[in-house]
Image: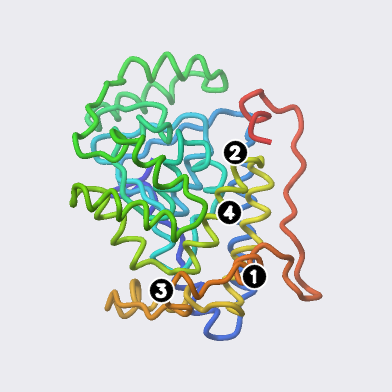
Amino acid sequence: MGNGRAFCAGGDVATVVRDISEGNWKLGANFFEKEFILNYIMATYRKPQVSILNGIVMGGGAGASIHGRFRIVTENTVFAMPETALGLFPDVGASYFLSRLPGFFGEYVGLTGTRLDGPEMLACGLATHFVHSKQLPLLEKELCEVNIDDPLNICKIIDKYVEVPILKEKSAYRELHIVDKCFSCRTVEDILSSLENENAERSGGWISAAIESLKTASPTSLKIFLKSIREGRLQGVGQCLMREYRMVCHVLRGQVSRDFSEGCRAILVDKDKNPKWSPCRLDLVTDDMVDHYFSRVNGEEWTDLKLPARSNLPASAMAKL
């Protein structure tokens, strides 16, 4: 559980970008290597993990919680994977856990960086329980007093405090059929075109917001994430993290695009919120450019992500491999 207004708002990407500017992209690679290994250990941990997401959960914060077995949200929870607006892409295993959401809701969440509240997280499966924040002290106290190695004990305790929240009327999840129609398209261009067709019939709401997000995000980030989540649908969590590590190393090297540095400058450093993406349009990001992010990184000192061996895992962890 976090302390204050956030569970975890993500990693210190500004420091990573500073290292890149100083010619030390491998320092950033070392950071992501450790983070992804930790994500894998959490996803395959024998003991059940209980995450109480009472506040902001973004980026790396999702990696530190969503892989766990119990994910409790409250009326204060705000979840997002906003990386495409930064010139990065939803990582920390997002191509695994977002691709497991109903229909193509994961593509919607990852491409647009939209914010979800607690009820929406519960509805789509990112959360397992909803508990009002005023009940958290009692819940924590009970959890600390019992043997939590047994998931059934945890379930019995949490169930004492759960509530059934109401999904807001304007939630995109209430229109999953439209989300699926648009975000099941093969390319980002087709997704955007499908959304604009829907918006022509009834402008406003989540569809307009999605269009705006896609038009302002990094074109390169959008394309590499769409390919990533589509591959993730058929891969285990370890394979997803290994692929994402390749991708993030290419992002850090900046041989195809330096959008990550530019996005962090515009959003986090100068805060002018006016990034100059390069390439600046979706049609300028070719398939060969996208494929480059999924290839091995050339360099004598670089290796693929090496994940620790796991054994004697419970069925809940085995299902992720």
170 horizontally vs 234: left or right: left
From the viewer's perspective, is the residue at label 2 or at label 4 nearer? 4
Q: Give the image quarter of residue 140.
A: top left
Q: Does residue 108 lie above or below 162 as drawn? A: below
x and y percent of residue 292 in the render? 66, 69
Residue mark closest to the camera, 2 vs 1: 1
The mark nearer the N terminus, 2 or 1, is 2
Find residue 263 and name its label.
3
- Label 1: which secondary element: helix
Q: Residue under circle 2?
A: 43
Residue behind mark 4 = 228
Provide the secondary structure element on which disc 4 rests.
helix
Label 4 or label 1, whichever lies nearer to me, is: 1
Q: Nearer the viewer, residue 228 or 189?
A: 189
Q: The N terminus is located in which quarter?
A: top left
Residue at image point 43% right, 62% down:
84
Q: Nearer the viewer, mark 3 or mark 2?
A: 3
Q: On residue 288, which mark appears?
A: 1
Picture coordinates of residue 239, whole percent (x, y): 69, 47
Q: In the rendered structure, which amino acid carries the disc numbered 1?
A: Asp
